[in-house]
Image (cartoon, rainbow, N blue to C red):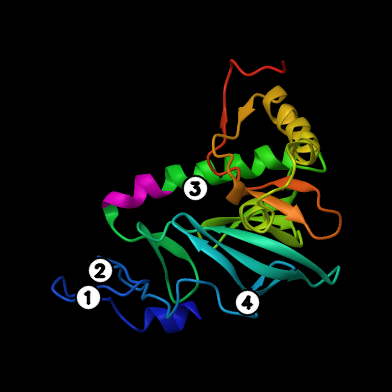
Amino acid sequence: MSDNLESLGPVVVDPTRPLAANEPRRALGTRPAAASLALPVGFRLLEYRIDGVLGQGGFGIAYAATDVNLNAKVVVKEYLPEEFAYRAADNTVSAREDEHQDFYQVGLDSFLVEARTLATFRHRNIVRVARFFEANRTAYMVLEYERGQSLKAWRRNRAHIPEEALVSLLAPLLDGLALVHRSGYLHRDIKPDNIYVRDEDGSLVLLDFGAARWTRGACGR
């Protein structure tokens, strides 16, 4: 495929033309943009097959995927800050502009820190990272697939739930959060959108450690 891409020649971007969602803002030689920002359905990342997009935010894309070796559903999270990066036709990811390269790399390093952080936690109420790896000039983390809904959506239909029931529901999650703090990390983005209610038993699981930071002052109290 790389030989075919090289034969396409340099890509020239007209600065007066509005940019598509997945398009570089500079001439990038032999790296034309892909038709879509997200990876295509059926794409293989090691043993993981992309089945579709679950969500897309400012700093990445979450995919529904299948571990073809285990025939198990997983979630694959890809680092791709769409304001500063784009996907090339060979499915690699690059900064849109030369001046964004440092920002892109810092974000990539933070993404890997998040993955390593989550991979060290073993608690039922903390989302589990099965593995993480670098590929396509970006990084990915593979998370266990959780069936359920956000606490925000769940609460919307339970406006009059007793305080005692809420406390009982939150207690195990707070135990998991205490583990995070004892490990020296602060989540820094706890909100109903980042807490999931499992379909199977109604228990909670804390998601999205993208804003987590290590702190010397953290301790279990």
Q: Which numbered disc flags the more N-terminal residue, 3 or 1?
A: 1
In-front residue for pair 217/12: 217
Amino acid on which disc 1 is placed: Val
Q: Which residue is mark 2?
A: 27
Q: Is 147 above or below relative to 36? A: above
Alpha carbons under labels 3 and 1: distance apart: 27 Å
> Is residue 41 rendered magenta in the image?
no
Q: Residues within 10 Å of mark 2 (few under 14, many from 20)?
A: some
Q: Which residue is mark 4?
A: 43
Instruction: Report the predominant secondary structure element of the magenta stretch.
Output: helix
- Which residues, given as a range, are shown in magenta? 99-104
Amino acid on which disc 4 is placed: Phe
Amino acid on which disc 2 is placed: Ala
Mark 3 vs mark 1, foreground winner is: 3
Q: Secondary structure at mark 2?
A: loop
Q: Which residue is mark 3?
A: 108
Q: Is residue 151 left or right of residue 16?
A: right
Pointers 1 and 2 in contact (C-beta within 8 Å): yes
Q: Which residue is mark 1?
A: 12
The percent coordinates of residue 106 (x first, y second) are: 44, 42
**Residue 25, quarter of the rendered image:** bottom left
